[in-house]
Image: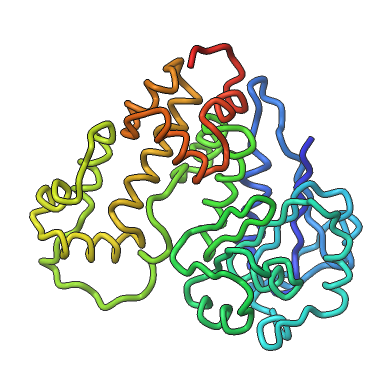
Amino acid sequence: MHRIVTLAMDGVIPFELGIPPRIFGIARGPDGEPLYEVLTCTVDGAPVRTDADFTIAVGHGAEALEDADTVVIPATHALGSISTEGRLPAPLADAITRIRPGTRLVSICTAAYVLAAAGLLDGRPATTHWGNTDHFQKLFPKVKVNPNVLFVDDGDVLTSAGVAAGIDLCLHIVRRDHGAEVANRVARRCVVPPWRDGGQAQFIEHPIPAPTATTTAPTRAWALERLHEPLSLGELAAHARMSRRTFTRRFRDEMGLSPGQWLILQRVELARRLLETSDLPVDGVALRSGFGTAASLRQHLQVAIGVSPMAYRRTFRPVNVNA
């Protein structure tokens, strides 16, 4: 069984500490079997203070990290020298060295500072809470910070934006490991959306718009019903009754993505669902998801998740299909 170990640091935020055991702990296979073993540890096995008015006692010390398949580090409000000097305290640095090479590493919110201070994000894309991205980038210039997204999946290292984005990232990991059906069941149990559109750019503080300001939400809903059609920027703007320039600016303000980027993401997600749940050949999936040809679908799926359509289908739906 895949072992998830959550490392709780002093000052940990209880909400974020509770995300891994909740999301991974209720993930079940087709026969109801648990798919993950979830443990929580501290650097020394001792209780840790939270940023609330209570402490948390755990059953494991840093030795639990040695057998982990995935290590999740939730945010803390007591980063100390990590956020001021980019340096890990010796006990935490020693704990991090216990993690085996190749172990999947996950940070929630400002816990990205821990991975960065350990040198594990050098040269890699990452994100953190939007309120910290400028400081984070200055402190760790070797990291390729993306301030707009909810999370970044860079294979064996994954980072999320603030608080609830940790839920998005953990659901993404379940989906990556076991497919959309399992992840959707977990999301329904937790009463959260299995996938949120856009990035954290939509949550960054902006001046409150005038009450009469229009939104692109109706046009996004309209487009989702027509992903199989060759939707152009002009058609989207016309539906929203805006000029192309105004529509593009407003869309990016709301979603943190251009209309074209958003359409590709939605089509990739639709293609993944069809590959997992239907017997459509790859050409049919390409047409239904709006990519037109199998070659175009292969190209976009390779960029998005690094695999071909048939490899993805074999992983998440191991049945014989014609493609």
Please identify the residue farthest to the bottom as the structure is shown: 84
Residue plotted at (51% across, 81% down)? 134
Please identify the residue farthest to the front as the structure is shown: 295
Residue plotted at (60% across, 39% down)? 176
Q: Position of residue 149 (x, y in %)?
A: 46, 61
Quarter of the rendering containing residue 148: bottom left
Q: Using the image, determine if residue 189 lies above or below residue 20.
A: above
Image quadrant holding the N terminus, namely top right
Q: Is residue 27 left or right of residue 5?
A: left
Residue plotted at (88% across, 61% down)? 62
Color encoding of the figure: rainbow
Q: In front here: 17 or 297? A: 297
Q: Using the image, determine if residue 2 lies above or below residue 46.
A: above
Residue plotted at (14% across, 61% down)? 214
Please identify the residue farthest to the right as the structure is shown: 63
Q: Is residue 75 left or right of residue 273?
A: right
Callout count: 0
Q: Is residue 169 left or right of residue 238?
A: right
Q: Position of residue 246 (x, y in %)?
A: 16, 65
Q: Position of residue 103 (x, y in %)?
A: 78, 51
Q: Position of residue 202 (x, y in %)?
A: 35, 64
Quarter of the rendering containing residue 208: bottom left
